Amino acid sequence: MSDLAGTGLLAKINFRRDRIMMPGWLYLLTAVAVGTAYSSRATYDSAAKRLEFGATVNKNPALLALYGPVQDPASIGSVSLWKVGGIAAALVAVMSILITVRHTRADEEAGRLELVSAGVVGRYAALTAGVTTALTANVVLLVLVGGGLMLLGLPVAGSIMFALFWCSIGVMFTGVAAVTAQLTTTSRAANGLALTVLAGSYLIRAVGDVGPSWLVWASPLGWTARLRPYAGERWWVLAIVVAFAAVCFVSAFRLVGRRDIGAGLLPDRLGPAEAVAGLRSPLALAWRLQRGLLLGWIAGFAIYGAAIGGVVDNTQDMLGGKGGRDFLSKLGGHSGIVDAFLTTTMGLMGLFASAYAVQAVLRLRSEETSQLVEPLLATRVGRIGWALSHIVFAVVGPAILMIVDGVLVGLIHGLRAHDLAGEFPRVFWSALVQLPAVWVLAGITVALFGLAPRIAVAAWGLLGAFLLLGQLGPLLKLKQWMMDLSPFTHVPKLPGAEMRAQPVIWMIVVAAALTALGLAAFRRRDVG
């Protein structure tokens, strides 16, 4: 039997399993790239505005660390897509990691791969099918993003290179995830290890853009940044990308042949024979399971909050005058360019906090499908108590994140503006007012978990839809009733606008009702 026997069938199954998740990722990423280019092109419609913007960004260490430099301030494409070359580009790597691990290590961990391997399936079939699935997603993303940018009228060569820029990141981290899937015994560890490589690459690239420039060439994200779309494309850099991806794929295929199914090459650590005293309640167990995720998000919010606080004073220069003010005003700003910038930024951070809330709630589903809930429910632990032990993190966790963000942005901005007493409370409350909308999405996720657990992951699609409605709806002049579908549309536009308590109260009531509905449904349905 060939070592690749059954690859096509497994790949077909993978695409069927990802028929919701993969289109959701592709839709979100394409909309972010094309929508950002569409809005920024109108904002920086003159060479003077672009040059002023580029000079402001390239001398600001915080912006350089977050997004990298503006490669060619005179180029409309380079300026328009500058912001999606940093964090948004890293999301392509996250998509690739999750898809690859889902169809390799996760299937082994669940025992599905061992069952499938009893049939006519070769040793390398599962890894090949998983890698093929992730690579296909990246190729489709390349076509969608490149085509969308060209339809906007941006230069063809630059649009193709930008699409290759994103695709290259996805291909490289598909290879990284293929390797980490061979090293660990759990999908969580494989994802964590691959994401650690991604975070390290981002950090090295950030340090290189701010300090010693040679460090950029030590990071995979630095290589892709040096492809320079719309700024004198460097096609030869793609050879480095191909070489790195090839080394990762070859290593993964060699490693998969040197281990048993279900085993990893890194040894597992044995836990203690008895649980510690502080691990005797559902909440304590939930904290043990959720703490790594929460601490990682806190660190990310702290870094981003410090960076945003350091650039608020440069908003006037960054946004190029009246066009920039109009742009932010459409996104929700109402009183001055600084207030408009803070309103938009806090709304975006609220969406990020919602992503954490969805992750925290969906941990319930992963525990359920992994058959780790039934042993707990066989004890004195009740269903509602167990579910609430995780839901509390979806409520308290986003509050902690927005507090961290509000404190750091308010503190740094207040000190730089020499008006800490006046600016800090305004910024802090603009962060906290996002929480009711975050809790609504958490409530929707709980309701899906209770009523339709098999499609609970659809919460990610709703998050993407809310992101598009909030960030692009005003720019695309969508109907108001469509934008009202997003809870973030109803958040008071602080600072600058009047604080309205009624929508805040209603969103809290809706979030509580959805959570109660989900818990009641979970209490009545079968586990698993």
Image (spheres, rainbow, N blue to C red):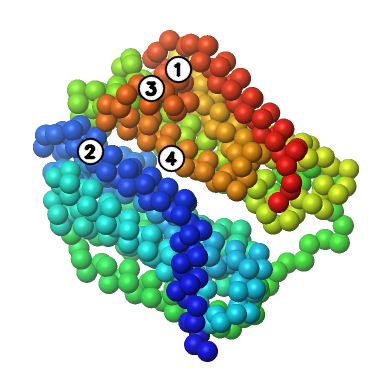
Q: Percent x, y for residue 17?
A: 51, 58
Could you say which quadrant of the image residue 334 lies in?
Answer: top left
Q: Earlier in the sequence, mark 2 or mark 4?
A: 2
Q: Percent x, y for residue 118?
A: 63, 79
Q: Earlier in the sequence, mark 3 or mark 2?
A: 2
- The residue singled out by tag 4 in the image is 464
Q: Amino acid at mark 4?
A: Gly
| Pointer 4 local density, CA inside 10 Å: few below 14, some 14–19, many at least 20 | many
Q: Earlier in the sequence, mark 4 or mark 3?
A: 4
Q: Is residue 378 left or right of 261 when viewed as pictured?
A: right
- Residue 147: which disc? none
- The residue singled out by tag 2 in the image is 38
Q: Earlier in the sequence, mark 4 or mark 1?
A: 4
Observer-side mark, 1 or 3, equals 3
For the residues bearing labels 2 and 4, Cβ distance under 8 angstroms: no
Q: Amino acid at mark 2?
A: Tyr
Q: Is residue 25 left or right of 322 when viewed as pictured?
A: right
Residue 435 visible somewhere in the drawing: no
- The residue singled out by tag 3 in the image is 481
- Work out which residue is located at the far bottom of the displayed protein and give it: 1
Up the image or down, 50 lies above or below 134; here it is: above
